[in-house]
Amino acid sequence: MIDAQLEALAVDTRRDIYTMLLERPRSVQEMADELPVSRPAVSQHLKVLVEAGLAKATTVATRRVYSVDPVGAAEFRAWADRLWSDAIGRFADFVTTDDKESEMLAEEVGIEPVVKSLRLKLTPDEAFRRFTEEIHTWWPLDTHSVGEDQAVSVRFESHVGGRIVETTADGVEHEWGRVISWEKGRGIEFSWYPGLPPDQRTTVDVRFREVSGGTEMILLHTGWEARGETAPEIRDNYNTGWDYVLEKYTTSILG
């Protein structure tokens, strides 16, 4: 099924059609009106998408309406999620080795990312919720915040584009970053610039995958070049800083 889906989406026009269906169900004529191809051509492309399990047809009154097939879409997303999680895991293994090859590659691609990996006796859903929705219960605000001893809370706004926000005792909010992707039980990616202008943002990607006995959480912090000449030093500070922060996270789970 995945091979058929990848082959179906390898054609530009079919990707355009599938993107349109992701927005809302449409008739063949509606899609033909927005595309530089004929109605019969749209029908042929839809046939391929239907056979690949990516789209389905429904009769509404006298019209035939096409929409995304949720079963096929879920299979494709699960495959992509597994691929991404495996890639992050292998990358984590790679950058934490000490051999010469990894050092040479790090020099070629820029400043080495910060990578952290944890094993947790929770389900991926539970680990995700604890990291995001319950961040206020474990984040060490007194040492890792803008307001330090004046900081009273921090929260994620749980949607793409949502803020990571610290609130201080005087009610002032300090934005730490913005959510780039939010996938419950799978992962979250966000920009990161606490106490800084957004143009100095780095990127944090946290993934959760089920393993024997619980969940593996992998944190990847990249984009250090945005911090200019001091980037290597800042990267090293965060490397130890994340150890301290994630210790608070795991302690909250055990406690």
Image: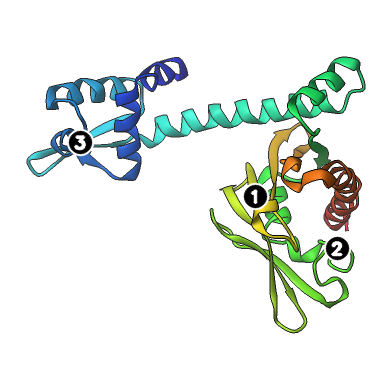
Q: Which mark is residue 81?
A: none
Residue type beneath disc 3: Met
The nearer-to-camera label among 1 and 2 is 1
Q: Secondary structure at mark 1?
A: strand
Residue type beneath disc 1: Phe
Kindly give the residue lying farthest to the bottom in the view shown. 170
Q: Is residue 16 left or right of residue 108?
A: left
Up/down of 239 relative to 136, above or below: above
For label 2, count other residues whose C-alpha is less than 10 Å away and answer few (under 14), some (14-19) or many (20+): many
The residue beneath circle 3 is: 31
Q: Is residue 24 left or right of residue 91?
A: left
The residue beneath circle 2 is: 140
Gap in angstroms between the C-alphas marked 3 and 1? 34 Å
CB-based contact (under 8 Å), mark 1 and mark 2: no
- On the image, the x and y values in percent for residue 18 come to 33, 32
Gap in angstroms between the C-alphas marked 2 and 3? 52 Å
Disc nearer the start of the sequence (3/1): 3
Q: What is the quadrant of the C terminus in the image?
A: bottom right
- On the image, the x and y values in percent for residue 4 come to 40, 16
Q: Which mark is residue 190?
A: 1
What colour scheme was applied to this rendering of the protein?
rainbow
